[in-house]
Image (cartoon, rainbow, N blue to C red):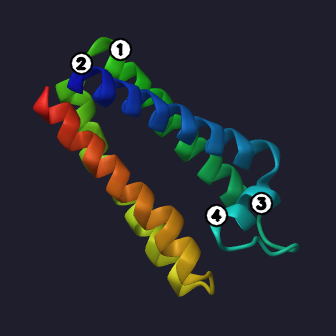
């Protein structure tokens, strides 16, 4: 049961971050608003593309690690990659986003990723 939960959560988290990355590539302004810091209309769209590529890459790498290197490698990956949503929490707070978005989305994501890392280390 623990193995199924750990692997299932890891797959779900990786697929979800791929979805977020693709959304930033396809509809960057809407994705930025959902992130918690709306993009400026005259801003440089390249930064939104960078976010999309970053998130997509994280998700693909996570799935590859899970498939080809196993739970232990994925656990280390999740432990490290939790820094991204922790940083996102600070970005949202520092740039006028709401506390609800910062903590309810980004910080909560970091906690779930860290829980998944612990589950993966346990199997």
Left or right side of 18 for 28: right
Q: Quadrant of residue 97?
A: bottom right
Q: Quadrant of residue 76?
A: top left
Residue 88's label in the rendered image is: none
Residue 67's label in the rendered image is: 1
Which mark is first along the chain, 4 or 2?
4
59 shown above or below 100: above
In this view, which residue lies farthest toward the right?
41
Q: Nearer the viewer, residue 38 or 11?
A: 11
Query: Cα distance, mark 1 to mark 2?
Result: 6 Å
Which mark is first along the chain, 2 or 3?
3
Query: Cα distance, mark 4 to mark 3?
Result: 15 Å
Residue at (45, 77) in percent of width and height: 90
Residue named by callout 3: 45
Q: Residues within 10 Å of mark 2 (few under 14, many from 20)?
A: some
Query: Cα distance, mark 1 to mark 3?
Result: 33 Å
Q: Residues within 10 Å of mark 3 (few under 14, many from 20)?
A: some
Q: Secondary structure at mark 2?
A: loop
Query: Cα distance, mark 2 to mark 4?
Result: 30 Å
Residue named by callout 2: 70
Q: Secondary structure at mark 1?
A: helix
Q: Secondary structure at mark 4?
A: helix
Residue at (12, 33) in percent of width and height: 122
Residue 35's label in the rendered image is: 4
Could you say where residue 31 lies in the image, as x and y percent from the top left? 73, 56
Answer whether labels 1 and 2 touch (C-beta < 8 Å).
no
99 shown above or below 44: below
Residue at (64, 64) in percent of width and height: 35
Residue at (69, 39) in percent of width and height: 22
In this view, which residue lies farthest toward the top?
68
């Amino acid at each position: 049961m623990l193995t199924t939960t750990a692997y299932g959560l890891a797959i779900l988290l990786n697929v979800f971050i791929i979805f977020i990355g693709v959304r930033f590539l396809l509809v960057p302004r809407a994705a930025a608003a959902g992130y918690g810091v709306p993009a400026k209309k005259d801003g440089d769209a390249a930064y939104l593309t960078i976010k999309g590529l970053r998130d997509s890459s994280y998700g693909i790498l996570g799935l590859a690690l899970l498939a080809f290197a196993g739970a232990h490698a994925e656990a280390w990956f999740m432990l490290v990659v939790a820094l991204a949503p922790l940083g996102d929490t600070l970005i949202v707070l520092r740039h006028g986003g709401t506390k609800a978005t910062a903590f309810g989305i980004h910080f909560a994501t970091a906690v779930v990723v860290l829980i998944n890392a612990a589950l993966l280390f346990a199997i």
